[in-house]
Amino acid sequence: MLVDSHCHLNFPEFAQDLTQVIENAHAHNIKYMLTVNTRIAESLDIQKIADSYPNIFCSVGVHPHDSKDYNDTTLIEQLKAHAAHPKVVAFGETGLDYYYNKSDADAQINCFKMHLDVSNELNLPVIIHTRNADEDTLSCLDAHPNTRGVFHCFSGSSEFAKQGLDRGLYISFSGIITFKNATELREAVKFVPLDRILVETDSPFLAPIPHRGKRNEPAFTRFVAEMVAELKSITLEEVAETTTKNFFDLFNKATP
């Protein structure tokens, strides 16, 4: 049994066949999924999906791209209100993205810190998106030393992974680790202890080989897990067992 720890089931790519997508996942032994919020305005749609399927959980949060639109303290109360929903098990995705810079750095940092404040207050983990922003991401985390969370869709170096591990975070790997040019990232997979790894699709994006270029979906979590198993010279069953345990240890509001 595997868990897709990060997907976006409310996105338009799944609007026509969501039930089939979920059935595909179950057929490939992906039993649980966490569908992740990127805008508060979509929170109720996300929660409706989680309520409709017993093995789907959800989060609430604002993607760094959209942080310019949620840059005052009313966000804190919105996050708290949505976190009361029984299927909301985390805050995020949130964080910093200086690659696209769709929101300016100050807005991103302010929004990220509000998520971290609420995460610490309510003891719910945070799903962290970080790209080209290592130093500021770590600085925000160091100002919130009790944060529980995960670097999702990790694409950094082994050294940056170590910085996250040293701060108690989990590291989640996606289909990127199957790409031919992902040599450094595969080294990070080897470096991170299995008991700190999650697997995800980030679907509908980043479909792994052999489906690269097509719509990604939770069923393809298996290809990520198989690559983790290959890189660590262990069985797929070991990866499945440990990453599933890791998921429920981190997202402990979720119940299997």
Image (cartoon, grey):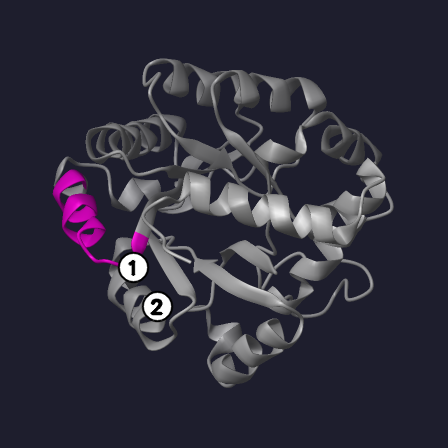
Could you classify mark 1 by the number of other residues whose Cα lies within 10 Å: few (under 14), some (14-19), or many (20 or more)? Answer: many
Mark with earlier residue (2, 1): 2
Q: Give the range drawn in magenta.
A: 76-88
Picture coordinates of residue 199, whole percent (x, y)? 61, 48
- Looking at the image, residue 147 lies above or below residue 45: above
Q: Which residue is drawn at 35% across and 68% down?
A: 50
Residue 82 shows up from this direction: yes
Q: In the picture provided, is 84 more to the left or to the right than 229?
A: left
Q: In the picture provided, is 109 more to the left or to the right than 198?
A: left
Total of numbered circles in the picture? 2
Q: Residue at x 56, y 57 (%)?
A: 4
Label 1 sits on a secondary structure element that is loop
* Image quadrant where one finds the C terminus: bottom left
- Looking at the image, residue 130 lies above or below residue 230: above
Which quarter of the figure has residue 212? Answer: bottom right
Picture coordinates of residue 230, whole percent (x, y)? 84, 45
The amino acid marked with disc number 2 is Ala
Instruction: Tell whether position 85 is magenta.
Output: yes
Residue 61 shows up from this direction: no
Dominant secondary structure of the residues highlighted in magenta in the image = helix
Q: Mark 2 points at which residue?
A: 50
Which quarter of the figure has residue 189? Answer: top right
Pick the front one: 96 or 243: 243
Asked if labels 1 and 2 touch by Cβ distance under 8 angstroms, the answer is yes
Could you classify mark 2 by the number of other residues whose Cα lies within 10 Å: few (under 14), some (14-19), or many (20 or more)? Answer: many
Pick the front one: 154 or 28: 28
Label 2 sits on a secondary structure element that is helix
Q: Which residue is drawn at 12% across and 43% down?
A: 77
Q: Which mark is residue 175?
A: none
The amino acid marked with disc number 1 is Lys
Q: Name the residue under label 1.
A: 87
Q: In the picture provided, is 224 more to the left or to the right than 169?
A: right
